[in-house]
Image (tube, grey):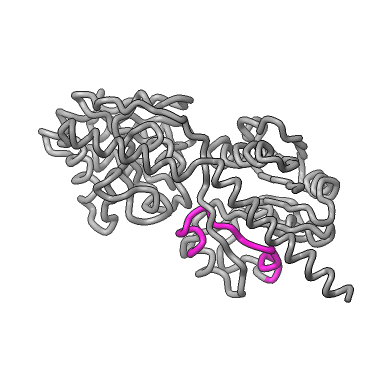
Amino acid sequence: MEIVATWLSTAPGGAERSVAELSEALQQQGHRVRVVLWEKTPGAGGVLPGGAAVVRPTNAAAYRRALTEALRPGAVLIGTHRTAAVDIEVARERGAVVLCVLRALLVPGGRLRLLDPGTGRLTPTPLGRLDWERLAGADCWVGVSAAATASLLQAAPLPVQVATIYNGIPLPERARVRPACAVRRLAVVARLEEWKNIDRVLAAFAALPAWAADRTRLEVIGDGPARARLEALTARLGLGERVCFHGHVQDWSGLADVVVSASTDEAFGRSVVEAGAAGLPQIVPDRGGQSELVLNEVTGLVYDTSDPASLTEAMARAAAWPQPRYTRLARAARAHALRYGIGPCAAAYADLAADLAADLAASGLRAAA
């Protein structure tokens, strides 16, 4: 199968890695893959997929030309919500199948950054102003979690074909479950942006009772535009040496015992799966895609976002886990993470694409008859 995978990147992060890894996995499974990688911020595309041809357009016109040249009749375009309007238009012109992957959560009152076909600009668009007459023309929209798919169905005023394919990541074949440190290291692993709600993690950490505060540290792993504000907040809360900002760390699993998130608008939650693969339990909110990745009380804790004290209570519970309890959670987290390997993810995309390509070919035959 001929597949063209695309991404419009503004900053390095999990989505960039997911596109590269999916492209490489599809190539390894025997498909011919070309990647159209538009980096609006130079260097934001991250690691490129091995074995796949990569085209790097630098503007909207070059992006459209690259798609037109890459797509042949019957080929499959695995695009993204950011470029959906252009992807759908070009795929229709070329007789190709188009899958638009929703790598975001559509929340009431929120905005979705989309490429405007007229201006070529990436524009934050209110959900009520999305051009569904155009967007509904995709052969299928793919949510990267059930939450993402449900948010799409709720936002779309027109019928759209949808599927859910969870993101996949390369997983180590074996991982040793390490004992937790005596002082338990709670870790945030994320790009430091406002919508990640890392300030809520800091506030919850500051509210720990004295016995739990003495037994925990907070490791903030990642970088981004909110770092200076979060460091200032840490100082105002009097957390001092109990919190460490590490910046970006490629292999961070050795810095953590439990991974914590407060982001309620995550469509997936790559760091949650990476934590599980490394044998680390997780604490996540009960909203968004991350809650689908954690088995409450089995691989970690899912806390109640309607209760302001719930995150602090979850952190305190993690601090109090005795070593046998921690080890059981860690082993279960490792086993559960295996559900989200990149191989099954790529196979699911290939199966869906093949079905849609067959439907497209059949409709052409029916029209000719």
Location of the C terminus by quadrant is bottom right
- Considering only vertical position in the picture, is 5 above or below 87? above
Say which of 259 and 357 sits in front: 357
Q: Residue furthest left?
A: 211
User: Relative to residue 79, is residue 69 drawn left or right?
Assistant: right
Q: Which residues are magenta?
A: 133-150
**Residue at 27% in and 59% down:** 306
Classify residue 7 by image quadrant. Answer: top right
| Magenta residue check for 224 | no
Residue 335 at x, y = what percent? 37, 40
Residue 363 at x, y = what percent? 79, 70
Say which of 19 and 304 sits in front: 19
**Residue at 34% in and 48% down:** 294
Say which of 38 and 363 sits in front: 363
- Considering only vertical position in the picture, is 153 above or below 95? below
Residue 110 at x, y = what percent? 50, 60
